[in-house]
Image: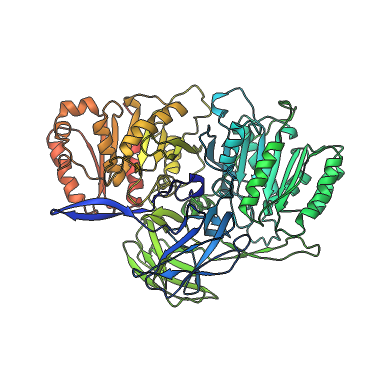
Amino acid sequence: MQTKQNQALTMHPLFFDAIYRTAYMEKKDGKVALKYKDDICGVRLEDNKDVTFTMRAPSAETVEVAGVGGSMGRDRIRLERDEEGNFSKTVSGIAPGFHYHFWYVDGVQVTNPVAPVAYGCFGATNFFEVPREGEDFWFLKDVPHGDVQVRTYVSSVNEHVKKCYVYTPPSYGSAPEKKYPVLYVQHGVGEDETGWIWNGKLNFILDNLIAEGKCKEMIVVMCSGYAFLKDEDPVFYPGDFGREITENVIPFIESNYRTAKGRSNRAMAGLSLGSAQATQFVARFQHLFAHLGVFSGMRDGETEQILSQHEKYPMETVFMTGGIGEQGLAERQKVYTDRFQALGVAGGQRSYPGYHEWHVWRASLKDFAELIFQGEDRGDQGEADFTYEECTLTKEQLDRQTFAEHILMFDPIYKGLIRAVDEKGRPAGKYKDEHCGAEVTDVAGGKARFWIRAQGAKTVEVDIWGMGCFAMEKAEEDWWSCEVTGIEKGFHYYGIKVNGVDVLDSNAPVGYGGFRAINYLEMPEEDFEEYRIRQTPHGTVHLNYYPSKETGRTKLCYVYTPASYEKEPERRYPVLYLQHGGGENEAGWVWQGKLANLADNLIAAGEMEEMIVVMNTGYAFPENGAYHPSMSAFTEELVSSGIPYIDNTYRTIADKAHRAMAGLSMGGMQTQKCVYAHPELFEWAGIFSGGLIIQNEEVDYSHILLDPEEFAKRFKLLFVACGTEESSFESTKKNEETVLAAGVPIVPFEGYGYHDWTFWRHCANDFLRRLFKA
């Protein structure tokens, strides 16, 4: 069901190249085989720009969808039911742009788990894209791609661990002497640090502009603009994020990247709330910034302050923008941009088709990026060095953040916005606390309380995978709630059913599992510290894009590099290729598996060799040509496209003695298929819950697994793990015993565990300690 449309139109944080397929068991000639079939796509853009909305809701009477305002409007569109209980409708005439939208089941507002999801409106919110004819500046193109890095720093303002996304241009890794200017760009209210990458497509915009020679190469930093203090009741500005930028973010960036010094080499921009923060920061710290971008906002007092200090701190660029539909904004902005231009400042005011929405802000970013850092490279400007120093956080705070982090928001806030304006008509909203969807109330008793807002619902249930469904009851205001006891330690996926329909809780941690967006809960394992966030040197998680020879599509892989990677530029590293299971994808090991936390802590303790870890999506369905019915063509793709890309991009030790592959479930099966077929590539392998195959109707590995001499030629380690509660435990155990009895030294790993992330984290913890050691 994958479309041929540009992948920028379908990507979302939970799945870069969504497959909209699901696995099923096929019985044929008395045999059972795992295969894939097309599944529902919640929102599909048709070739003629119509949009088809679909939701599986057999128990519902009505399903509707509506925009949140702006270019799509708020009118509800009623979908039509088919005989199988799927509600669907194809709609013409939706305006081009990025569209957040809500779904309504029997009138109850919900989030569709099989439609694209991003972080917006203070939670997981569905969206779709309709491209404007002839506009492709934000598309994924065949140009050199910059590196998107997820970095970790500590805020001294609210004493939280924070993540920022950092874009480095394509030349950054190959030009070790070059220094780059930096753009700091902020999100809007209700959004977070993920917005400019996943909603704004910032990295693709910069890639394309740089390739076309239309903008200077630059580093771009995207942070979460929330710095709430305990018991604080802020108006509009969420805490003193300006102090966090200057005391923590800029020092962190300038201590870890090759940045050009001086205010001429530093820009600040933002959208909506972020535009107000950007204006405030530049006014407050004029010695740091000479370029300002204001997208869909206007702050009169701070702008006057910048103008009043122009002689001492001359601005080089002031650029203000908005949507044509944002009434009165262009006129207010132009009053100021005319004054700046009269002083010789580049920029001006521009308006774009749309309202207060992402397609306006993308165009704003593109035009701003073309304006800033122009002219001759000025190099360093005599500015003093910034020093980054972390304050020490409590173990309790680090644990809280470990159990709360997820792909849509690393340091979640559970807030709503009370919209208001001040006496001058400026935004002056206040923030109200909301419930987290799942709150652990008693670790010893395995108790957790679940919450969801479901105004008007008849029934609401929480479905904890492996435990069953639990009825929720009406609680305060529009909230439903229940407490569940006896939840075992570890990681638990759970779903929500509203009037019997599967939905996603927008206010709880979310991942991709079971071929859909799914919520999850962490019940702390008190005796397992290695996967928790600790203040050790942190590695970097990279988002890298490369073409697949098998499918002709672009792949996204997540790559972990240890903390030493940037600090020791001559050093080369071994590589582990680590795969997810069926129903999950490339993001799983980072966010559900906590791979980066594990690696950081084990390396800091001297219990793991420093290595690069590559996490790829295990689905590769060629449009033409055969592929394995349950494992796709991924093993061929990894060899033909994935490994060459990594060896050409990173400082790897590119030989089999320094290359490993491992995976869980389907990833464990793919590992076996790949490492046995390519002894020239791998000497280390790990099979987590993927069974141990000696011989079956499809393959025969007995000449390796039952021959000690042949095994010794191929492997330094074959690690085989299976949980004692898994259905495949007995067969795996029997095959392990057969192989060991033949004198082949595989390393079994077992323990009390199900087919879940709790067990796979323990597998990784043991396996990583063994890799690449003599």
Q: Is residue 48 above or below residue 641?
A: below
Q: Is residue 170 visible?
A: yes
Q: Quadrant of residue 30?
A: bottom left
Q: Position of residue 178 (x, y in %)?
A: 62, 24
Q: Quadrant of residue 272?
A: bottom right
Figure disc tally: 0
Q: Position of residue 171 (x, y in %)?
A: 57, 28
Q: Residue at x 30, y 29 (%)?
A: 682
**For residue 594, side relative to residue 382 (left or right):** left
Colour convention of the picture? rainbow
Q: Is residue 523 visible?
A: no
Q: Is residue 625 above or below residue 729?
A: above
Q: Position of residue 490 (x, y in %)?
A: 37, 55
For the residue pair 219 and 60, the one nearer the viewer reads as 60
**For residue 86, side relative to residue 221 (left or right):** left
Point out the image quarter for the C terminus: top left
For the residue pair 101 and 762, the one nearer the viewer reads as 101
Q: Position of residue 435 (x, y in %)?
A: 53, 66
**For residue 707, side relative to residue 116 (left or right):** left
**For residue 278, side relative to residue 594 (left or right):** right
Q: Is residue 681 above or below residue 517?
A: above
Hey, which residue is sitting farthest front in the picture? Answer: 48
